[in-house]
Image: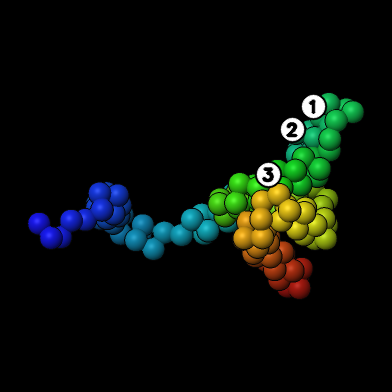
Amino acid sequence: MSDISNPFELWMKQAQEMAKSMNPALESFSPKGFEQLWPTMPKEFMEMSFGKGLNKDGLDAKTRLLITLAGLTMLGAQSDTQMRLTVRHALEAGATKDEIAETIAMMSVFAGIPSMNRAMEFAREVLDEEQDKDETS
């Protein structure tokens, strides 16, 4: 019994084989591609749902999204999909590229440089996509 495998690796391999047998297209499934199917909410909807629509004297949607971005960075920017979606929504809510970068950079003090760098990479991906869209429009 010299070939002892990690049970988690075996489970993952079995799940991947099962997914391929059900739908061969799942072999090349990309969560990032799936993320592109999720629409960015309009600014007015965000404001109504979790901006001043909840509390007229409270935080606006842009501020709430920047706080969410800071929180995700504090968690180590582990969820790349959530990071990119939050950046997209923050932009739609009126945040500037500088405000997004400053929010993430400020977290280096609290979350550490690695978390900040990871969050900045995800933000840069979205900002580059937005720039490409602007240039082609």
Report whether residue 101 is seen: yes
Left/right placement of residue 16 relative to residue 5 reads right
Could you tell me the amino acid type at mark 1? Leu
Q: Mark 3 points at which residue?
A: 71
Task: Say if mark 1 contacts mark 3, CB within 8 Å.
Answer: no
Q: Distance between the residues labelled 1 and 2?
A: 7 Å
Q: Residue at x 56, y 50 (%)?
A: 79
* Mark count: 3
The residue indicated by pointer 2 is: 49
Report the quarter where the C terminus lies: bottom right
- The amino acid type, in three-letter code, at marker 2 is Ser
Quarter assignment of residue 3: bottom left
Question: In this view of the protein, can residue 122 be seen by the observer?
Answer: no
Q: What is the distance, in whole Å, between disc 3 and disc 2 at their CAs?
A: 19 Å
- Which mark is nearer the camera, 1 or 3? 3
The residue lying toward the viewer, choosing from 55 and 109, is 109
Q: Which residue lies furthest to the right in this view?
A: 57
Residue denoted by label 1 = 54
Residue 12: assigned label: none
**Label 3 Cα neighbours within 10 Å, binned few <14 / some 14-19 / many ≥20:** some
In contact (CB < 8 Å): disc 3 and disc 2:
no
Q: Which comes before the other along the chain, label 3 or label 2?
A: 2
Residue 90 locus on image (x, y percent):
75, 50
- Describe residue 23's horizontal placement relative to residue 42 as left or right: left
**Mark found first going from the N terminus, 1 or 2:** 2
In the image: residue 29, left or right of residue 103 = left
Q: Residues within 10 Å of mark 1 (few under 14, many from 20)?
A: few
Circle 2 crowding by C-alpha within 10 Å: few under 14, some 14–19, many from 20: few
Callout 1: SS: loop
Q: For the residues labelled 1 and 2, say whether their Cβ atoms are less than 8 Å apart.
A: yes
